[in-house]
Amino acid sequence: MKRTKDNDMSHDSTKSDAGATVEKLSRREFAKTSMAAGAVAVTIPGVMQAAQQSSDGAPATAKPTQKAGSGTVEHRDGTTIPAEYYYKMEHYLKDEDYIAENWWLMADHVSRIPEAGDFFVFKFGLGESAIVVRNESGDINAFHNVCRHRGSRLCRHDEDPRPDDDRLSVRQAGESGNAQVFRCPYHAWMYDLDGNLINAYDTHDDFEMAANGLVKCHIRIEKGHIFLNFSRDEEPPPFEDPFSYGFQRISEKHDMAGLKVGTRKSYQIKANWKLGLENFMECYHCGASHDHLVATHNWDYSLSDGRRERWDNRVADWIGPELAADRGTGSGGPYDGELNPGFVTGSVDGKPLAPLLPGIKDWSHDTDIAITWFDTGYWQTYDDHIVVARFTPRGPELTDVEIFWLVHPDAVAGIDFDPEKLRELWDITIIEDAWIVENNHVGIKSMGYRSGRYSTHEVQPSFFAAWYMREIVNG
């Protein structure tokens, strides 16, 4: 599926069962309604209103969506995605193609490859991988990890066979490191840091070295983050869509380009990528699943007016009325969250984890969140660090999760911060999330599964499901 072009923004309108006009939004338009995790867009057009009405308790009227392939897919706004779209290969392949053509995937932070020749391999989907490398001029390039000769991988990919016998001659670059050239392990064709073919022997007289360099991936460096797009088109999709709200708001508060990765950890969730994203779009599950997280953060959106007033007074007593007046509005607006009394940052014990980030003079007892499902990224800020997570589809029942923790550029591991302590809260949280998401995935494959009704606190997953069924399944 090809992405929607800027000059092809026509609106398709259909009538809902209630008689209201429901617009089929383009990817670009829908992206502009995304604000932050747990947040509702200020203006909710067409189809988004239908999804919200269903999640808010109005009858979720059954109606067929647009035709998909040879049939019509039944889906009710405000309910979960039908089971087969979470695990069947035929649907995953359509997901993967759509993401490759339309989304910018957050790969990492620029501080991962500070020196010329530093590189890493970013893996996406069933078999895609890209070499991300800093060249001699300091620029960052991205190339498909495929030799132009006969298609061998240049660098290791996690599913590649790896001879581990020292007697064998085959050698291949790893998944990260430093290199001056990339040498194919098959026939020794070599490429420089700009992807140019610089060595290929016994070629034909009319063979052009300059025309056989590595195939480039679309790349964009934004606020210190490396974003990749795998589209086959020469022109990449618009970049600004996913970042019109939450990411830009966080970027205005913190100079993320000037920070560095203090520590990182990788996880694999044996579940569909959509379940991982949906889980991070709501905290309805937090009270049941994340004791440490809810002890740190105030994410109870269900407080009555009386309890909310008492809570606000308690917070004001602890941090002062001026800071308390700047609190966000939970799941009803942009999410500027608050930490519980006794906690100054995202730590298990509430104590500082690292030096305050540049530009921050004192503890604000604050936390900001942005999630942008058009690049499968998640950001959560604290005064002394920023947690960054990405969810990368790897198959119908496999999702890579990479988390890195950004700290002050001058902070030294082991002196200014303890990497293990820095990871602790979110490491516990992700392990818990992996368990509940995998458990969810297994349950969805049961013959007893039926599309469930989202709660009033699951507005973002409800929006996502409605969008997915219209844009990817039936687009």
Image (cartoon, grey):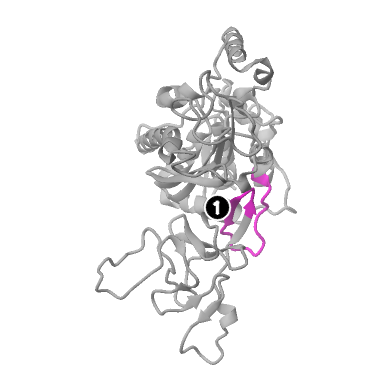
Q: Is residue 404 left or right of residue 258?
A: left
SS class, disc 1: helix
The residue at the far front in this view is 415
**Quadrant of the image occupied by residue 157:** bottom left
Q: Residue furthest bottom?
A: 205
Q: Identify the residue at image location x=26%, y=70%.
A: 166
Q: Amino acid at mark 1?
A: Ser
Q: How many marks?
A: 1
Left of 244 or right of it: where is 353? left
222 within the magenta span: yes
Q: Is residue 358 above or below residue 89?
A: above
Q: In front here: 264 or 290?
A: 264
Q: Quadrant of the N terminus?
A: bottom right
Question: Which residues lie in the magenta part?
Answer: 221-242
Seen in the picture, residue 252 relative to 326 is either above or below; the reply is below
In x, y percent, where is residue 321?
Answer: 67, 15
Pinpoint residue 277: horizontal percent, then vertical percent.
Answer: 50, 39
For the residue pair 474 and 178, the one nearer the viewer reads as 178
Placement of 251 over or under 322, stated as above or below? below
* Quadrant in the picture for residue 248: top right
At 44% from the left and 25% from the top, the residue drawn is 349
Q: Taking 321 as reference, is 458 above or below it?
A: below
Query: Which residue lies under the disc numbered 1?
Result: 111
- Residue 161: x %, y % from top left: 32, 64
User: Can residue 39 be spotted in the picture?
Assistant: yes
- Give the quadrant of residue 331: top right
Side of 460 relative to 127 (left or right): right
Residue 201 magenta: no
Residue 76 appears in the rendering: no
Residues 206 and 408: in front is: 408
Task: Give x and y (percent) for residue 361.
Answer: 64, 31
